[in-house]
Each structure stands twice: as structure tokens, then as C-alpha cells.
């Protein structure tokens, strides 16, 4: 499998696993699922944190560069290759193309 195709396949699997984890988290928090099995015990706690209400900050703070840091991230995105590049018809799934390496 081509590394680009593998990457897309992994991202799709991660997305499905995260959706399942989110659904289970909801069930634990809402009391719809038991919190203990024979092997694991789940703990549900509420945590608070303070956050700024950005729209309420004075303009001079928002415009003062010394009060802010820039964060840089490497971002990898993907899209299906064109039908011409694949040598066939357009893909049904625009986010994933699987070809042998």
C-alpha cells in the first residue's frame, strides 16, 4: 500500500475510533453505562478551568504583540487524486483512494 493511501486509511480509522470513544464518554457521564468491568474502573470527574472571554478583552490587549505568542503546527491534509492521475473514473469517495504501492 502506498504511504499516502495508508495515511488516509489510518485517519479514517482514527476518526471512527474517536467517534466511538466520544459515544462511550457520553454514556459514562450520563450514567447510561456501568463504570466498572472486571478489568477496568472508569472515573468521571468535573474539572474547571479559567478562560478569557476574548470578545470582552480591551482592544489594546488584543493588539499588543508582546502579550501573544504564535504557535506553529505542521498540518497534513489529503484529497483524492484526479481520475486522470489514477488512470480511471472519478472515485465515489473523495477523501480516500486505495491503490497498491
Image (tube, helix red, strand yellow):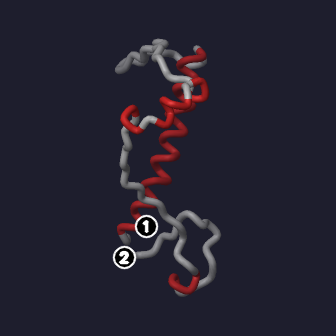
Residue toward you, 91 or 73: 73
> Between marks 2 and 1, how big is the CA–CA gap?
9 Å
Give coordinates of residue 20: x percent, y percent.
53, 37
Q: Which residue is mark 2?
A: 101
Vertical placement of 100 versus 61: above or below? below
The N terminus - image quarter? bottom left
Q: Give the mark nearer the N terminus: 2 vs 1.
A: 1
Q: Residue drawn 57% across and 22% down? A: 27
Give coordinates of residue 21: x percent, y percent.
50, 33
Vertical placement of 47 versus 3: above or below? above
Label 1: state its secondary structure: helix
Vertical placement of 98 versus 77: above or below? below
- Report which quarter residue 95 is drawn in: bottom right
Q: Are marks 2 and 1 in contact (CB under 8 Å)?
A: yes
Q: Residue drawn 50% across and 53% down? A: 12
Is 22 displayed left or right of 89 in the figure?
left
Residue toward you, 50 or 77: 50
Residue toward you, 49 or 4: 49
Label 2: state its secondary structure: loop
The C terminus - image quarter? bottom left
Give coordinates of residue 7: x percent, y percent.
40, 60
Give coordinates of residue 64: x percent, y percent.
44, 35
Is 97 displayed left or right of 37 in the figure?
right
| Direction front: furthest residue | 60
Q: Residue drawn 46% across and 12% down? A: 45
Determine which of the numbered discs, if any, sits on residue 5 in the image.
1
Amino acid at each position: 500500500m502506498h504511504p499516502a493511501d495508508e495515511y488516509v486509511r489510518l485517519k479514517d480509522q482514527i476518526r471512527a475510533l474517536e467517534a466511538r470513544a466520544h459515544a462511550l464518554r457520553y454514556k459514562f457521564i450520563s450514567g447510561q453505562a456501568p463504570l466498572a468491568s472486571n478489568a477496568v474502573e472508569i472515573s468521571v470527574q468535573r474539572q474547571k478551568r479559567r478562560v478569557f472571554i476574548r470578545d470582552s478583552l480591551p482592544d489594546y490587549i488584543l493588539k499588543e504583540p508582546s502579550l501573544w505568542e504564535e504557535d506553529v503546527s505542521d498540518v497534513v491534509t489529503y484529497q483524492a487524486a484526479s481520475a486522470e492521475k489514477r488512470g480511471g473514473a472519478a472515485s465515489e469517495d473523495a477523501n480516500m483512494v486505495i491503490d497498491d504501492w
